Amino acid sequence: MLDLRLFGHRNYAIATFCSVLGFLIIQGLLSVFVFQLQLLMGNTSSLAGMVYLLMFFVAGPAIAILHELNKTIDVRLISFFDFVGLAGILTWLGLFDRLAWFDQLFWSMLSFGFSIALFFAPLASLAMHRLSGAKLIRAAEELALLRTVAGSYGISLLAVVQFRRLPFHQLDLGSGLID
């Protein structure tokens, strides 16, 4: 059961909202990108997995560095620049609507991995700011729960959007072949 009194803390409410909304979009778009890599770009599942593996090579070390930076730099500033960076990177990934080679996706996925690392820690730090004891533990549990639920909804939501928009795009592609 959710402790709604935690949303009375402004930092927790804003950070949780941003974390939930951001993870809904990120997780949904990552699931659609797998579809795009395999079906539209013709990559094997192994190659699509290697494209995703690039993100994790950057994200692990970046998280370790970021935990130290959180102590010296305002986490709101980090989160702001991360959201701007994510918007740019997701736009960049959206431009791969035709065949793209692994080396063309390399830099965009490395950048995406760095932005994913910058996404979680600052928002969690902001959400837990000025909470202590049992409230801190409860807030961390709720944030993780809500973020996980949002990610699963994001996968389902974008799959439905993709399914519903597929006939439109097929017609659009088909009409381009006739001209």
Image (tube, rainbow, N blue to C red):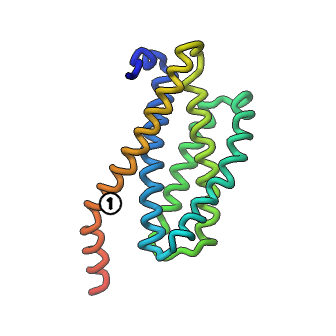
Q: Residues within 10 Å of mark 1 (few under 14, many from 20)?
A: some
Q: Classify residue 136 as left or right of residue 36.
A: right
Residue at 29% of width from left, 66% of height from top? Answer: 166
Asked if residue 125 is positioned above or below residue 35 in the image, the reply reads: above
Residue at 57% of width from left, 15% of height from top? Answer: 131
Asked if residue 56 is positioned above or below residue 63 in the image, the reply reads: below
Q: Classify residue 29 as left or right of residue 60.
A: left
Residue at 60% of width from left, 61% of height from top? Answer: 108
Asked if residue 33 is positioned above or below residue 1 in the image, the reply reads: below
Residue matched to label 1: 162
- Which amino acid is tagged 1? Gln
- Residue 25, position in %: x, y? 43, 47
Residue 118 image-quadrant placement? top right
Residue at 54% of width from left, 49% of height from top? Answer: 86
- Residue 122, position in %: x, y? 61, 33
Asked if residue 177 is positioned above or below residue 149 in the image, the reply reads: below
Quadrant where the C terminus lies?
Answer: bottom left
Quadrant where the N terminus lies?
Answer: top left
Q: In this view, which residue lies farthest toward the bottom? A: 178
Number of callouts:
1
- Foreground pick, 4 / 106: 4
Residue 174 image-quadrant placement? bottom left
Which structural element holds mark 1?
A: helix
- Residue 58, position in %: x, y? 68, 53
